[in-house]
Image (cartoon, coloured by chain):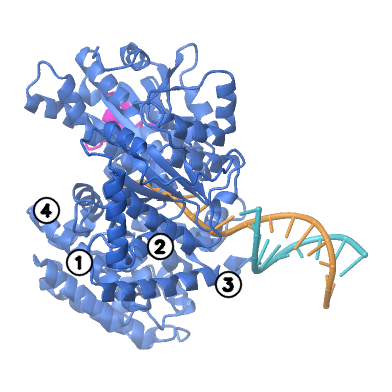
Chain colours: A blue, B orange, C cyan
Amino acid sequence: MAADLTPSQSKVVDFPYLPNSTLKVVAGPGSGKTLTLLHKVYHLIESGEIAPNEILILSLTNKAVDNVITRLFDVFEQLNEKHTEEQLREIIGDLEVHTVHGLANRVVIENEGIINIIEENGWRGLMKLVSEDFWKNKRPRMPSTKDFKKLFEQYKNQKTGTKDVVKKLTDIMQNCGVVTNEELIDRASRYLSSDLVSESETMQYTRELKGKIKVVIIDEFQDLYPSLLPLLRRISLGKQLILFGDSNQSIYSFLGSNKEAMRAIEGIHTGQDFHVMHLHDNFRCTPEIMAAATQVIPAKRKEMKDGEIEKVCKDKCGVKPIMENFSNPLDELEFVRDQISQLVCASARLSDIAILTRTNNQMQLIADHLQSYGINSHKLTAQPDWMTDTRIQFLIDLMKVISLSHREESLERKNSMNRPWKSDFSLIVTLGALKGATNQSIQILYNECLRRDTSLWRYISSVPVSDWPTAVTNKRKISNCAIELQKLMNNGEFLYSDDPMHILREICSFAHEMGFQMLQPTSDGDAEQFRQHLEDMYTILKLCLTNRPNDMPLIEWFLHSHFEQSLSYYHQNPVPRAGSRDVLKISTIHSSKGLEFPIVFLMGGLSWFQTFSQFEDNVLYVGMTRAKNLLYLLNTKHPGLDCEPTKRNIMANEKFWRYYNTDLNRATAADSMSAIRRYDCLQRKYGGFSINHRPFSTLSVARNNKLIKLVAYIARK
DNA sequence: CTAGATTGACTTTTT
DNA sequence: GTCAATCTAG
């Protein structure tokens, strides 16, 4: 095998293919897990025993999947001896690489057509359909969609005495093809275990998953949790199951116990065919960082005592992780800003630096703060911001209502039986957002529809308002909404339009006329953000125009594929806004898993790191082991870490910067005098710090705004 | 009705 | 770990 692998890596790669067996590879941080995985895949194919399309690679997060896919070609090309580039690409194209949910999605779609995953707006809509007694004795004064979801799941799980309301809601979801993520996994595993589907021609993908796959590789096994088990068992039974991961990096325990899941998965193939291997070496972190990280995890400390610790392959850098505590988050931010300016004045580049946080909220706060100094940053989120904007999701729901209702009408004309009214769900979401539509009105209307066995759309669009039940308030508003919807629907220019701008403008002006509460911006910044997200949506609409099938209207294609398209577009153009190439990275610790950065700031912020259960240990451990050379621990109090103030000036530490530049293969000179000079110059010139040379006046205004926000934030706490 | 005890939320992701 | 809301005993 290739000479650039370590002995323990080669052992994994050379392990023979055995059906009905399990191989578990324990791979600590920076141990070359992905590289080994890809070598393994290549070896399986080259040995001739396994065809590319007989290999399935699964992971939980998009990031892990992206990581594998982006490195596939490079690694394969390097190993390649006899194939042409084209053949190589074909081999890679044949591999199945998915997130578990992505795979489940494909299976379910193939078996029952388009489905939608319920989101915030969906829950809000359904919430409109339940009466007071649903909340029992425990209703928060202002029930949030989260509360609702939780209670709903609770009702659903207790099989006995399930309320009628719950049945009604699940019926709507069933009929309209709306599922929760948990259900998605559930259904997929049902399709995979059912024997019925194997006969049908159209269920090719499902069938191939069941029959064709010979090797199932699970990347990041520490992310698995029990409710995925039925699906995973189905998929890997009888195959060779290869697991890569590190239980110390298990940070999704809030989804369910990883220990339990692993016990079950390791037991899938009974008998002796279970092997465990370790990748021992760490090529990423400095010994100083690893020593500190090891202190964080009790199990690790024990391993170290027993002499089992993995070998760190880098030399000492001479600088221990820098620990600082602040009583005020603003001080913390200012410290970070100052350190960044020092680092950049020495040998570091902005893009070397990553700031990791516990929460998405905190991430935004830091991004805003640095932005106000003109320091651009790039957020490493799994999804682009606009896709998670509930306002955008609402607009998409509007498009759904129009598209689905339109189809319902044309089907009705052909007199076909289409009992399940597919538009009900989206329409409820839409009506629920109308200002004057009370829960009660919507409930009464919907019950009336159930009684008459008709769709909600048909009812509000064709039954005269005077015939509606008297208890419905704000009839005119609701019917007016129906009339306006109808206008858009009958207007072929809208539904069959090829003009993204036209579509967007129509849908926005409809939303504007209706005065939907949720679209009202609460501030200038809010409005600007919405505008930006609309622009992003426009980009995807335009993209859809270029790649849609010939026989499909643009809107339908967009509704069908916008999620996937946005993700892949985002993946290919990850920094749409920030102008310069050299930007700082900001991420939650969860999203940073699998990545590495020369310099890492771990932000304790408002004290979440003080709450340490053993699972939080892992989060801290993951965060710390992202750092290759320099690690800052801010407000991260942990019993295992002793906080000795290392007050040495990093900027002037030539020895460290020489180490740094060598490690990153850079020819930059480490000259402390000029670093200090640069820093002084920056300080003098801008009174603070600005990379992008923004004029001082706008800078200070932005800074003041930010300060006000921050103070408000602290006061709220 | 009130003091004291108990419980749960806070946070992280998946299309 | 902390805070707020709810529950229970007297």
Closer to the camera in the image, A421 or A70? A70
Task: State which tag comes first along the sequence, 1 or 4.
Answer: 1
* Residue drawn at the location 39% of the way across and 32% of the way down: A317
How far from the left and from the top, in percent, is residue A583? 26, 52
In the picture, the disc for residue A548 is 4
Q: Quadrant of residue A698?
A: bottom left
Task: Report the Cα–Cα distance between label 4 and label 2.
Answer: 38 Å
From the image, state whether disc 3 or disc 4 is nearer to you.
4
Tag 1 and tag 3 share a subunit: yes
Q: Amino acid at mark 3?
A: Glu
> Looking at the picture, do discs 1 and 2 lie on one chain?
yes
- Chain under disc 1: A
Looking at numbered disc 4 in the image, what kind of residue is underneath it?
A: Arg
The magenta-colored residue range is: A193-212
The disc labelled 2 sits on which kind of residue?
Leu
In which chain is the residue bearing label 3? A
Whole-angstrom CA distance, mark 1 to mark 4, is 20 Å
